[in-house]
Amino acid sequence: MACVHGNDPRTCIVCKTLAELDSMTGNAAAGGRRATTAAPVDIVSRGGGDRTPARGGGHFGYHVAVFAAVLIAAAISVWFVAGIVFAFIRVFEVLLVAAVAGTLGYRLGRARGRREQR
């Protein structure tokens, strides 16, 4: 005859564990009667009821705070990198304008100097 878990009651790990729990709590297993009944879901899912259910929901605020901190750090990093990129663009722009102005000034001055020598 199989236990409620579909296994042989002598080799079923769940039934053996429940029998050990009964021996630790002092409840009699009633001659193997426990092996033919289903275990309460509370004992199987929470491992004997060590935890209190009110403690499980307090992490949402922590996760929101961590997400906000990561988002702010990412925004500051992007802002910093964009500032560096635009600073290089501005320096390149000033050098380009200086080169164009110098070239035009040189050519205009040279052309004007030729006219004055004639």
Image: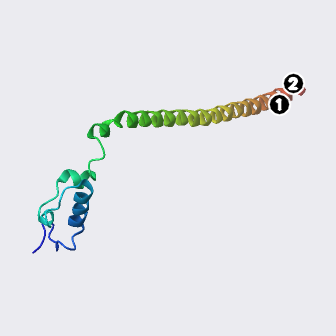
Q: Which residue is drawn at the image coordinates 85% and 30% (left, top)?
A: 114
Q: Which residue is mark 2?
A: 116
As shown in the figure, which amino acid type bears the numbered disc 2?
Glu
Q: Observer-nearest residue: 65 or 76? A: 65
Kindly identify which numbered label has been placed on residue 110: 1
Looking at the image, residue 69 sits to the left or right of residue 54; the answer is right
Q: Earlier in the sequence, mark 2 or mark 1?
A: 1
Instruction: Check disc 1 and report its element: helix, strand or loop.
Output: helix
Instruction: Please tell me whether mark 2 or mark 1 is closer to you in this view.
Output: 1
Percent position of residue 88, x then y: 65, 36
Looking at the image, residue 9 sits to the left or right of residue 64; the answer is left
As shown in the figure, which amino acid type bears the numbered disc 1?
Arg
Tell me the quadrant of the picture where the C terminus can be found. top right
Is the Cβ of the residue at disc 2 closer than 8 Å to that at disc 1?
no
Real-space Cα separation, disc 2 to disc 1, in angstroms: 10 Å
Percent position of residue 54, x then y: 28, 37
Q: Quadrant of the rendered structure where residue 117 is?
A: top right
Q: Which residue is drawn at the image coordinates 18% and 53% (left, top)?
A: 41
- Disc 1: CA contacts within 10 A as few (<14), some (14-19) or many (>=20): few
